[in-house]
Amino acid sequence: MKKILIINLARMGDLLQSTPLLEEIKKESPDSRITMLANSKFAAICERLPFIDEIIKFDVEEIAKSISESNKNLIEIYKDLKNKIESLNRKGFSKIINLTHSKMSAFLMSLLDCNDKNGITVDPNGFRVIKNDWMIYFFNAAINRRFNPFNLVDMYLLTTGKKNSIKSLLLELHNEDIAEAENFYAAKNVKKDDLLIGLQPGASKSHKQWPVKNFAQVASKIKKIIDAKIVVFGTSAESHLAEEIRKIAGEDIIDATGVTTMKNLPAFISRCRMLITNDTGTMHIASAVNVPVIEISIGPVNYTETGPYGEGHYVIQTNVKCSPCSFNVKCKNEICKETVLPEEVIYTIKAMLGYEEMKNEKPKTLFLNSNLFYSRFDSEGFLEFVSPFPLPLNKTLFWKEIYRIFWEYVYFGKEHDETLESNIDVRFGKYYFENDFIVEKESKKIIERIDEIIELAEEGKEIIKKIIRALTESPDAVSTDISLLAKRVTEIDAEIYRLSLATEELLPICDVYRMKRESIDDPEATKVSWKCLALMEELQNNCRFFKKVIYKTFSSEVVQRKNSKKGKISFQVIR
């Protein structure tokens, strides 16, 4: 029997988003036993997730707090951690998948005994090592979020080399949970045929939270327009949000804050016709129980990577230029929260319920500072978000589409010339070009930077070949010449990184190279050199293909036709 450990120490939503991965593991190895190492705070939801055979709780916050407090005995903390690690090692895992970005998870991973590790760990010298190419992309996406075109669920799945065959999240509804939900709603006079709409006004961070007054306006208007009943979800700490909504929208708003648990929340959500929510774990529960979602995507939220997974959900995304911002940013002017209007949410609700036709043309007074998207799966089986209206192509969307094409070909080995042009036509056929969308100068600069990187990599390859020859001829020698050559390779790596920092559109490619380079884990200098040589070659090939995608995009019939209508962009400069 294959014993597999999944390390997922993040939040409830991340655990739900890993369920298609769990299913694929079970499909591949039906007799495997899956153990989930989860954050104690969110481990309860694991009891409602399929395919998990054992749940082990890990108190992330308590351990971090204990380490930071000077009055704690570090020896006792070490002993406690040591006991946990020894207990895990006794289980004899044959495969470990670490889905968490944190230093703590990397440290745990390094202490676990297993020959097949996937994800972040640290080597004996304390340096970061990332096992598995798609895991490297996964971590790359976390730092280059603006250009990441893939949903987190698909990225989780791709660590196994699989795509999502079921195209949904997975969650089990238990009879006792359904009974609790039915009893609660019955006590609130919700009848079987009543149209019930859920609101989730809270969020894990305030900068992800749409103003509660906006939720209240939506509730107040929608219950009159379509005779709906409204229920507000949240923790007991968020009960003040429900109270504020009730003050504005009326006492008939149902307050379920503090009533639900992680185990029974899915049953409460499943009764709803739809859920209007911030980026929350509740949103992913709704997706898992097939309740349509309208997500308000503001602040650091990137709907592409964490939006509701499945067909037919909607996202209203702010279109301020600084969005999505970093999770670590403390914004003093959260204008993005005001760009999504209650009227836009109401319009989307009415359209989803069939009360209003969503035409191909955007309403004149709506979505002026935001964009509306709906979810679907593309021809490759990946989730994507598409506007129901003609959408102007901006810089971020342009490069995100370029990268979606690029990564699909690089990682899936498609036949480039046969399908590349048609793929470009499909991806860019969704947009129109506005007069102020000018990429001529920056595209020329990017091509120049690509050529510089290719040239630097060529120099690096020649130097590494010299190192390999020197090591092969005299394997025990530690010569000054080799040290100088190695120093120059390090300088070349630094120069490549500097060029990518100066041209952010190239960061995803160069960061993948850098992470792979840092993740070489081999004590033999000759083997390390051969791996470095292969990575330099891969970087060159990736840069050449990225340039090819840009060229093909600019020469695409669809792009040329749309561009000619505006007459603003000349692509001749980079041919």
Image (cartoon, grey):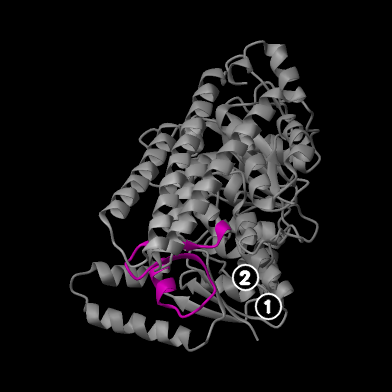
Magenta-drawn stretch contains 91: no
The residue stretch that appears in magenta: 106-133
Give the residue at x 45% y 60%: 101
- Locate residue 190, reporting x and y percent: 72, 59
Check disc 1: other Cα within 10 Å, few if <14, some if 14-19, many if 20+. few
Residue 152 image point, x, y percent: 59, 54
Q: Position of residue 403 (x, y in %)?
A: 61, 39
Q: In this view of the protein, can residue 102 be seen by the observer?
A: no
User: Which residue shows up at 63% across the image and 45% down it?
Assistant: 407
- In the image: residue 490, left or right of residue 71: right
In which quadrant of the rendered view does residue 20 lie? bottom right
What is the x, y in percent for residue 292?
A: 71, 51
Q: Which element type, helix, strand or loop, lies under badge 1?
A: helix
Q: Amino acid at mark 1?
A: Glu
The numbered disc on residue 513 is none
Is residue 458 positioned above or below 142 on the image?
A: above
User: In front here: 138 or 484?
Assistant: 484
Residue found 57% across the figure and 67% down from its top: 260
Q: Quadrant of residue 132?
A: bottom right
The answer to whether residue 267 is visible is yes
Query: Which label belongs to residue 176?
Result: 1
Of the pair 90 and 169, the residue shown nearer to us: 90
Asked if the magenta segment contains residue 111, the reply would be: yes
Is residue 506 rendered to the left or right of residue 549? Answer: left
